[in-house]
Amino acid sequence: MDKRIYLCLAHMSGREQNFIKEAFDTHWVVPLGPNVDAFEKELEEFVGEKKQVVALSAGTAAVHLALLACGVRPGDEVICQSFTFCASSHPITYLGGIPVFVDSECDSWNMDPELLEEAIRDRIAQTGKKPKAIVLVYLYGMPAKIDEIMEIANKYEIPVIEDAAEGFGSRFDGRICGTFGRFGVLSFNGNKMITTSGGGALICPDAEIKKQIMFYATQAREAYSYYQHEQIGYNYRMSNICAGIGRGQMTVAHDHIAHHKHICQLYKELLAEIEGIMLHENPSQRYDSNYWLNTIVLDPALHVVGEEHAYEAVIQGTVGGAAGVTHTAKTLHTACEPNRNVEAMRMALDKVGIESRPLWKPMHLQPVYTGNPCYVNGVSEVLFKCGLCLPSGPCVTEEDVVYIVEEIKCCIQEQSK
């Protein structure tokens, strides 16, 4: 093929350019303006449930402000799903809080309700006080067992922050993810279901809380003719330019979601005949994933061509198109890493122009969180060692999926020849 098939990349067109041009023509090139206001209204209509939305500079900023609004202070414990990206847990440490990690269940791969209650009870016994909040994640777009989790959270009166950064448009029992808890987090990074190039949003319960969040997101300025600050604020508001991109993306949001689901169905049909590979799907009809990323699990006994050469070379740069600068890897191995057949599959697909990536490494296994309290059952560690993300974006075509699955077959078949 003459192109590289990327894991996930939001698609933009002339619609976004029209909103951006309007922002420049009207001189609204600032972190407020008509596009920001309109984008927030469109998001409020999308999520429903009479929620209020604040457009922000990143999904991470939304997590940070939600924790702040939940009263997290230095020394407070916050329960966080372990199987996630670091943006779910790092903001806890920004506020001086302590992440307490809870493992996943096998159905949705998200927070295990039984472990959650065990963690709450044990933290109360250990510290004499309950955690300040629960950060639940919708991994790869898959809804969690939100009914069970909300029942436990309500029982102990602990607010829930739903990290729906990967779950834009996903539903549980027909209701949009991000609208069950106290707050919901959205992300519009370049690889999400819709994008503003960067950016995010916080779903708030009412107008009064939205006003409070906006105050902290705009440097916490008091109402004087000069700059008066009585509290610490942050520069977290979304720009009018980025919001213009978002408005254009909202016109195709439902199309993007439908496309991701269609791609998943194609993967399901084509992978069905390959023994030793399992596609992650909705556990039941109550779940309605957006399939932001389609993910597979490789049986540890599955042999992939070239697995004897996995982990022979130290990684020199970024893998998976990560933005920013990374440190050069110091060693070939870490204490917990994907199986050799998973790494071999990733390398083989990369050679033929197909980007894939291991699943998130659980936070309780990250060196930066060594020593943090954790309640684990081994599910996320097993999935990390055996799982791989496949191309799933709006630009992935039916022909691409056929090509990807054929190359996966070749990786296995050549080993047995």
Image (tube, rainbow, N blue to C red):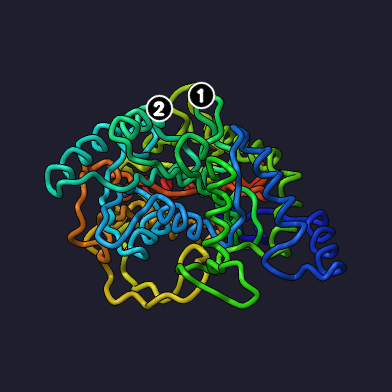
Judged from this view, the residue extending furthest toward the left is 126
Q: Amino acid at mark 1?
A: Asp
Taking depth in this image into account, of 219 and 296 the one nearest to the observer is 219
Q: Answer with left or right where residue 220 lies relative to residue 139.
A: right
- Of callouts 1 and 2, which one flags the residue occurring earlier in the amino acid sequence? 2
As helix, strand or loop, the secondary structure at mark 1 comes to loop
Q: CA distance from mark 1 to mark 2?
A: 9 Å
209 left or right of 130 in image? right
Mark 1 Cα shell of 10 Å, populated few (<14), some (14-19), many (≥20): few
Residue for badge 2: 147
Work out which quarter of the rendered image holds the N terminus and state it. Answer: bottom right
What SS does tag 2 mark?
helix
Looking at the picture, tell me which residue is in the foreground, 33 or 136.
33
Q: Where is residue 188 shown, x and y percent of the image?
A: 60, 55
Furthest residue to the top?
A: 285
Tell me whether the residue at label 1 lies in contact with that at label 2, contact meaning CB atoms closer than 8 angstroms: yes
Dividing the picture into quadrants, the one containing residue 310 is bottom left
Q: Residue furthest right?
A: 25
46 displayed left or right of 93: right
Q: Amino acid at mark 2?
A: Asp
| Residue nearer the viewer, 288 or 68 | 68
Return the x and y of residue 57 as percentages of the image width and height.
Answer: 58, 63
At 46% from the left and 47% from the top, the residue drawn is 163
Compared to 163, does 290 lie above or below? above
Q: Position of residue 306 (x, y in %)?
A: 37, 58
- Could you tell me residue 233's position as x and y percent? 49, 67
Badge number at residue 218: none
Would residue 148 be visible to someone looking at this image?
A: yes
Which residue, given by chain and number where applicable, does mark 1 sit on? 173
- Residue that lies at the very extreme toward the front in this rendered image: 224
Q: What residue sits 53% from the left and 47% below the top?
A: 209
